[in-house]
Image (tube, rainbow, N blue to C red):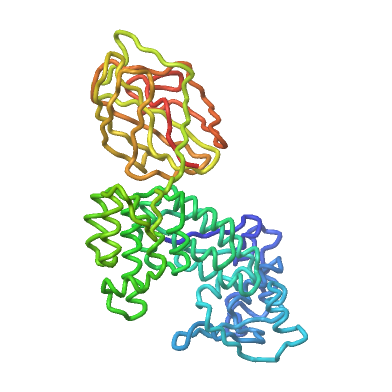
Amino acid sequence: MAAELIPSKNKLSPSPPASSSSSPNRNQQQNRTDHSSSPTGQGPHWQGLYPTIRERNSVMFNNEVMADVFFLVGPPGSTQRVPGHKYVLAVGSSVFHAMFYGELAEDQGEIRIPDVEPPSFLAMLKYIYCDEIQLCADTVLATLYAAKKYMVPHLARACVSFLEGSLSARSACVLLSQSCLFEEPELTLRCWEVIDAQAELALHSEGFCDIDARTLESILRRETLNAKELTVFEAALGWAEAECQRRDLDPSAENRRLVLGKAVYLLRLPSMPLDDFANGPAQSGLLTLGETNELFLWFTALNKPELLFCSAPRPGLPAQRCHRFQSCAYRSNQWRYRGRCDSIQFAVDKRVFVAGFGLYGSSCGSAEYGARIELKRQGATVGHNVVKYFSDGSSTTFPVWFEYPVQVEPDAFYTASVVLDGNELSYFGQEGMTEVQSGKVTFQFQCSSDSTNGTGVQGGQIPELVFYA
């Protein structure tokens, strides 16, 4: 997937202006087609076709005309020869300025750059020559590396913004590793937000196996991971197998333990349910016989042995609740369901992760409900689940959860919906608010056209949104 980020004020057009006052005369039009007389392919007077210095510089991008330096870009065997113009490069980068005009400048006709990929180097030159930023998901990290290496800060910031905007649970672990390498604290913080809130997805992602050992340890130490400890264990096991392959080792249990090293003790095995431990770590071959016996004693004996493994469970992120009603009520003939949909739209001013809803239950004694919950953006489903919950007959709300928390972006409306099956009479909300401040997040609510059971801003079901922020 490719994306192009071009600041509107700098957006260039390689063709001359369309207005009659600046249209080329007949001689210029003749020169345009007389390509044989100019190495630019645009005639001997091509400069007159472009009214701004940026447009004229753009003609020189990746052009051998007047080039006074050449770069051999890429690793041996797949290099690309890229022409450059020292003055333009020095104006765009302090590193190039030192290279060509500094006290230690060397007059080299060719410069080898084996550690930068050609597409990323060209993307950097495109910015320097043309004030255009063209980024795509496949090369943005390599472009960020080039921008950092040659000190092109505006391009680097654009790369970071691109990465933040496209960040997901499946890419967060790899980007965490890269953000630390590039010393980008804001991107690092953003990665942690995603990993904490969507830990189950992040740890199951393919990218998790590609992280370095230092990043693995930082994740295993994390107190706020919203994940079962068995999931953390399985992720570490998968990483160890991938690390064995990187080291050309047989992925045996012994070698997986070897590559994990002391990181194995960051796994909180004693905090697992006994069944999870018995069916997972105890049979994985990763533990010694003595460690397995000690852990079984930990689970079952009154006098528990001392362990090298941390026994305290991870607290995880605390869930927050946005309550949109000021009161609730019930009547003898409300609230009825009969397969109809209760729905409301909402927007937030900060990125959050919606984990589920709080729902009302029966107003006439305890009852069990089946709930089909859904979250949509612009008609597309971004989260759903089918769950059951037990209502004890009180007016409190009862949480229902999505399989995984859903990332909700600011300044866009989402539709929260539920179809309930259960006791026909339940509590319902009253005195609804169009705007609610919940912690540091502001929620706005509006009615949804999907609602067919009477729920709206002023009253109805879905009294709470449960979220992480």
Q: How far from the left and from the top, in percent, is residue 436?
A: 53, 28
| Left/right of residue 331 with respect to residue 192 in the rendered view | left
Residue 180 location, quadrant: bottom right
Q: Nearer the viewer, residue 391 or 51?
A: 391
Q: Is residue 118 above or below residue 144?
A: below
Residue at the spot x=28%, y=50% of the render?
A: 299
Residue 380 visible, this angle: yes
Residue 308 location, quadrant: bottom left
Q: How far from the left and from the top, in percent, is residue 127?
A: 61, 68
Q: Nearer the viewer, residue 334 or 388?
A: 388
Residue at the spot x=60%, y=84% of the render?
A: 64
Q: Nearer the viewer, residue 293 or 407?
A: 293
Judged from this view, the residue extending furthest toward the top is 332
Q: Is residue 176 above or below residue 378?
A: below
Judged from this view, the residue extending furthest toward the front is 303
Q: Is residue 364 above or below residue 181?
A: above
Residue 31 location, quadrant: bottom right
Judged from this view, the residue extending furthest toward the right is 103
| Left/right of residue 387 with respect to residue 101 in the rendered view | left
Q: Is residue 463 above or below residue 180?
A: above
Residue 30 visible, this angle: no
Quadrant in which the N terminus is drawn: bottom left
Residue at the spot x=63%, y=77% of the render?
A: 60
Q: How far from the left and from the top, in percent, is residue 346?
A: 46, 32
Q: Nearer the viewer, residue 288 or 233?
A: 288
Question: How many tags in the picture?
Answer: 0
Q: How far from the left and from the top, in percent, is residue 421?
A: 24, 25
